[in-house]
Amino acid sequence: MTVGRSNTSQNALLVAVVMMVAVTLTSCATVGISNTPAPVTDSVQQVEYYPFLVKGYQNSFPHRSILILIPNDARDMAGDTAPLNGNPQIGVAVDKDGNVMQRLYSTSLGPILQKAIARSADEAGLTAFSSIDSAYKSGVKNANAYVLESKITKCWVKKSRSGQVSRTVADVRIEVSIYKPPFSVPFWSGVTSDTYYDPPVGSFGLGPDDEAGIYDEPGQVLSVALTRTVAQIFERQDLRNLMLEDDIRAR
């Protein structure tokens, strides 16, 4: 009878231990599969023009002056895209499930684009000056041969993760009008845009899991798209021909 009671006690103890282990594993599993997203963070990115990134149009325009007005930020910003301390949102970083992990901002886009256009105009062979105004005023005498007015309709970057690879895509689009003072009708107008992928799609013939991005920050990827968009203004053959054929004395 004593042996029987001993076996019963041992069995009860074994059952208790098994139940404790099961509860512990269940608790660990519950913690491990938590789908609670991490808090969204904010990052102010540096967006800038990369001089001489785009080749081929340098010194192809006549040596004339052009006044660059401050571009208007005319982007259609839907959803939760409010500025951060006055800095406009320029994109997001998302996880593999599409959840926003980080909101991306930059300093005011107008001055950034104004500086970029002026630098690109200088590369093209023009002499660029910057204005504190954003709108062209017709009928007003101007010492410059041309005045460039523009607006930003798209400037956005998105960084995401696919497997072990981070991918970033940036879109920039601007509308441009160039005037010849004091006339009210644009001398030339056009739209330029660019979409840049990092890493480039199908880069180096590698598989999608072997590709690596060139840039560390989303703001750098957006800077490339911005640079290429701005350079397109002065790559336009129709604009170049107009200025080469223009008699600036006829005002």
Image (tube, rainbow, N blue to C red):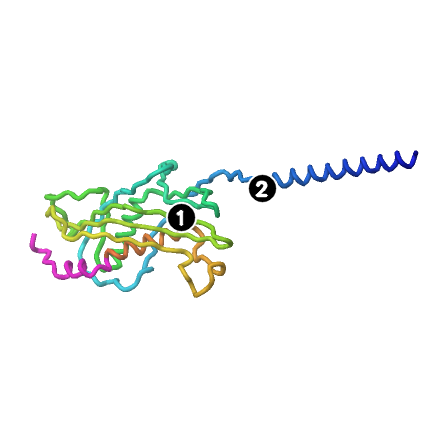
Q: Main secondary structure of the magenta part?
A: helix
Q: Quadrant of the N terminus?
A: top right
Q: Which residue is mark 2?
A: 33
SS of the residue at dot 2? loop
5 in relation to 163, above or below: above
Would you say 42 lies left or right of 121 here? right
Whether residue 201 sits left or right of residue 75 in the image: it is right
Tell me the kind of residue under disc 2.
Answer: Ile
Label 1: element kind: strand
Amino acid type of the residue that numbered disc 1 sits on in the rendered structure: Lys
x and y percentages locating residue 174 in the rendered image: 26, 49
Measure the alpha-carbon separation of dots 1 and 2.
27 Å
18 vs 197, left or right, is: right
Span colored in magenta: 234-251
| 168 vs 220, nearest the viewer | 168
Q: Residue 158 shows which numbered tag?
A: 1
